[in-house]
Image (spheres, rainbow, N blue to C red):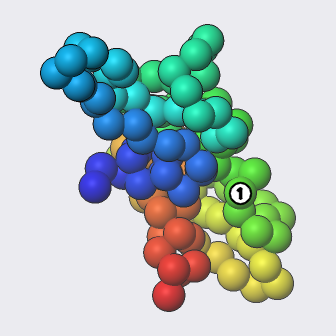
């Protein structure tokens, strides 16, 4: 599964597969729905999963609020990329490196998700 799809599912987005019925024709294209929405209406859906690895805005809108007991996020600029540090709980820390700050944050959140699933 792609990183952005994994993060979208964790954030509560729902994937609706393409629906086709021979007697009715196409009902819906496959799409991603925002959390708490169940149909392709208004602007609450997209043909692709949100591109979290390319947008800090999306990360802070949908992903960061879901991290339990988060108390600090820190970014550091390196010669070749960025480091994201998530500090949560009483003494937990995740460090991730990537080419952009948003990708570094997404990789750190992916590690957080994987740790929570254990």
Q: Residues within 10 Å of mark 1 (few under 14, many from 20)?
A: some
Residue in the picture at 29% in, 29% down = 19
- Percent across and percent down for residue 78 are 46, 50
Residue occupying image coordinates x 42% and y 41%: 15
Residue 90 placement (x, y as % from top left):
82, 84
Q: Which residue is mark 1?
A: 66
Q: Residue at x 24, y 25 (%)?
A: 20
Which residue: 39% across, 28% down?
31
Left or right side of 30 for 7: right
Q: Nearer the viewer, residue 50 or 94?
A: 50
User: Dividing the image into 4 quarters, which one contains the N terminus?
Assistant: bottom left
Residue 64 visible here: yes
Q: Considering only vertical position in the picture, is 40 above or below 63? A: above
Please give the count of numbered marks on the rendered protein: 1
Q: Secondary structure at mark 1?
A: helix
Image spot of residue 51 (x, y percent):
44, 33
Q: Is residue 78 visible?
A: no
* Front position in the image: 1 or 58: 1
82 shown above or below 20: below
- The picture quadrant where one finds residue 16 is top left
The picture quadrant where one finds residue 30 is top left
Nearer the observer, 44 or 95: 44
In the displayed image of the protein, which residue is found farthest to the front? 23
Q: Position of residue 108 (x, y in %)?
A: 52, 62
């Amino acid at each position: 599964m792609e990183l952005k799809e994994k993060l979208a599912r964790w954030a509560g987005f729902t994937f609706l597969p393409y629906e086709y019925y021979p007697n009715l024709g196409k009902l819906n294209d496959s799409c991603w729905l925002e959390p708490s929405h169940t149909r392709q209406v208004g602007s609450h859906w997209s043909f692709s999963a949100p591109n979290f690895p390319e947008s800090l805005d999306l990360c802070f809108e949908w992903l960061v609020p879901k991290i339990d007991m988060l108390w600090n996020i820190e970014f550091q600029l390196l010669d070749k990329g960025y480091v994201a540090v998530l500090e949560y709980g009483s003494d937990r820390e995740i460090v991730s490196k990537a080419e952009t700050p948003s990708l570094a944050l997404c990789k750190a959140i992916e590690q957080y998700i994987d740790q929570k699933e254990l």
